[in-house]
Image: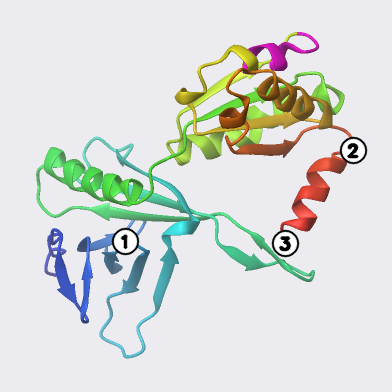
Amino acid sequence: RSPPAPSLPFPFPRNGLVGLLYGEFTDMLNDRVRYSVSLTESALTIQRISSSPGRTKVVFNLTDCVGCRAYRGPDSADVGAYFTAYFYPFKRRWMSAGVTRQRVEQCFRVALVQDPLANLQEAERWAHAIRDVRRPCRIMILVNPQSGRGQALQLFTGHIQGMLTEASVPYTLVITEHQNHARELVRKADLSQWDALVILSGDGLLFEVINGLMDREDWQEAIQIPLGILPGGSGNALAASVHHYSQ
């Protein structure tokens, strides 16, 4: 069995298109299953290598990709390295109408040579290339620990933190300590450190943040910073309304 082909650097012509990277890798759990993987500025295309016709091809839009990481496996005797890309494409709901974003994880084993370090470097090259297509957004996350019957912080650590880690998103977590804490913080903060402010709470904390932005001397510029809402309250009427009218 021949080893996987090495990755080709940018730019490479393939099927009439110019891409960023192309390589052939094996499945994470079964090294007899091989895939051809190509990366362009807009998509990651995965096709199983098989002698039978009608090979399955899957195309993932990079706008649905939240991140990618490279790593060594748990077995120290394994010379291969791995890279995993995380996507959240729209899919049809199971047993209900409509679509929703659902998590899809694509993992590949890189074993081009018998040198573990060289394989890890190749996996990191792919991970960097996938991440660099879209620079992660730097965000400040403000959490009211009293929201949602005291479960807002648990919601962050149990669900959101893992997604941020997968996406390699740099973030600053602020846990508010008293009423108007967020308002005072946003009014004085150097907003150039972040690309967006994300509020994990009920409706009240968002109003504090908006009031803090409007209190600033540079309010006309500050109010342009993107704001995100993660529903962490009891009713979450505002978040529900924003979601409804953005569909």
Q: CA distance from mark 3 to mark 1?
A: 26 Å
Q: Tell me the distance, in whole angstroms, between the alpha carbons under discs 2 and 1.
A: 40 Å
Please state the horizontal and vertical placement of residue 20, each as a whole percent of the image. 22, 60
- Give residue 235's mark: 2
Q: Is residue 184 magenta?
A: yes
Q: Which residue appears at 32% of the width and 55% of the height?
A: 108
- Give the amino acid at mark 3: Gln
Which residue in the rendered view is the most extreme toward the top?
Answer: 178
Residue 129's place in the image compared with 23, above or below, is: above
| Mark 1 burial class by Cα count in 10 Å: few <14, some 14-19, many 20+ | some
Q: Amino acid at mark 1?
A: Glu
Tell me the amino acid under the disc marked 2: Gly
Q: What's the CA distance linking mark 3 and mark 2?
A: 20 Å
Which element type, helix, strand or loop, lies under badge 2?
A: loop
Residue 49, by quadrant, is bottom left
The secondary structure type at the circle numbered 1 is loop
Which numbered circle lies on residue 247? 3
> Of residues 121 and 237, which is closer to you in this image?
237
> Label 2 neighbourhood size at 10 Å, few (<14), some (14-19), many (20+)?
few
Of mark 2 and mark 1, the one earlier in the sequence is: 1
Along the line of sight, the residue nearer the viewer: 28 or 41? 41
Residue 175 lies left or right of residue 144; in this view the side is left
Query: What residue is disc 1 on?
Result: 41
Label the magenta part by its dominant secondary structure: helix
* Residue numbers of the magenta segment: 178-186
Which residue occupies 42% across, 36% down?
168
Q: Is residue 171 left or right of residue 187?
A: left
